[in-house]
Amino acid sequence: MNLKIALLPGDGIGPEVIDQAVKVCDAIAQKHSHKITWESALVGAAAIDAVGDPYPDETHEICASSDAVLFGAIGHPRFDNDPSAKVRPEQGLLKMRQKLGLFANVRPTFTFPSLIDKSPLKRERIEGTDLVFYRELTGGIYFGKRGREDNGETAYDTCTYTREEIKRLAKKGFEAAQKRRKKLCCVDKANVLESSRLWRETIQAMEKDYPKVEVSYEFVDAVAMRLVQWPSDYDVLITENLFGDILTDEASVISGSMGLMPSASLGSTVSLYEPIHGSYPQAAGKDIANPLATVLSAAMLFEDMDLQQEADEIRRVVYKSLAEGVVTEDLAEGGKAYKTSEVGDWLAKNI
Ligand code: IPM
Ligand code: MG
């Protein structure tokens, strides 16, 4: 297969972890006789510095004409501490999601047997956890009407959803549940919010099309609690943009290592794959960041291209590196800490 992949390293540790994923993808491609053409583009603070726009048109053209996008991270502390900054790296991310139509953010949370004691939660609570969030990514309060009134003394943000937006996200969730343990949880706040009532109504009407999937409806505050009490009860969870932002951060700590959790943002024409950790500026340029979340994101990319065997092989080599202790300092626990680049080389070699 010929694949054209847009490469958006971004900021902080983004470029370093992306380099390792490229090594692994190239090794897989060589083994299975695929041809990958990589095309790099600017995003985030790096793009602001270079051209004054966190998601330049040129980057958009490259992404839109690719089969998939592999993304590192964006963000820089100099913007976080400057509330008056006119352009911010995060705006690039939102613009990219909107312009590429990346409407479904897929964030799995699973545990690795060898790392279970790194979780802040007790082993007996988290053993067997294997859940996935489908977070709506281009609607809701993030993209609703917002503004100030009363000479700036009053501010508002609005949460708007259309039935179609809910349906296309829910469809992804139902389809995933069908392939997994057939449980779907719709997370909302339908006891208070009108938009949540539309979510519930829409999903209830879809239930008949997926007779094998058992659907539950839970309020977001209760899910926040149950997620750390009994995470292994959940299979697929679907929710709107802001609830999903908050709950997926919560869920990411269950596994015990943010450095391991991948994600995908699905669009109708092109999809994007990225580690859920951020730009981790303190570690940038030191060759110490954990590249595994990015490598596992690449595995999601192959899976979505229907290259299941390639995806499985990438996952297997990642598990092998964990089992054999070929890991970066965040996971080394007194053992040898490998460099980011050494982990990448080892993975590629073992493919
Ligand atoms: C995420 C991030 C973004 C979001 C920020 C950086 C805008 O937190 O991808 O979850 O809130 O969506
Ligand atoms: Mg977030």
Image (tube, rainbow, N blue to C red):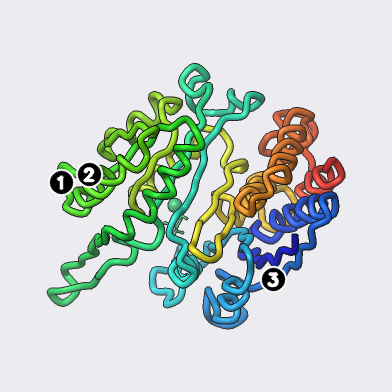
Q: Position of residue 163 (x, y in %)?
A: 27, 58
**Residue beneath the point at 28% across and 66% down:** 144
Tell me if I can see residue 258 in this picture. Answer: yes
Tell me if I can see residue 90 in this picture. Answer: no
Contact flag, marks 2 and 3 (Cβ < 8 Å): no
Say which quarter of the image contains residue 43: bottom right
Task: Name the element at disc 3.
Answer: strand
C-alpha gap between disc 2 and disc 3: 41 Å
Q: Is residue 263 left or right of residue 214?
A: right
Residue 189 disc label: 2
C-alpha gap between disc 3 and disc 1: 45 Å
Residue 192 disc label: 1
Is 268 drawn above or below residue 132 in the view shown? below
Contact flag, marks 3 and 1 (Cβ < 8 Å): no
C-alpha gap between disc 2 and disc 1: 6 Å
In depth, the one of 173 and 281 nearer the eye is 173
**Residue beneath the point at 30% across and 33% down:** 216
Contact flag, marks 2 and 1 (Cβ < 8 Å): yes
- The amino acid type found where label 1 is placed reads Val
Disc 3 marks which residue? 40
Q: Position of residue 6 (x, y in %)?
A: 66, 67
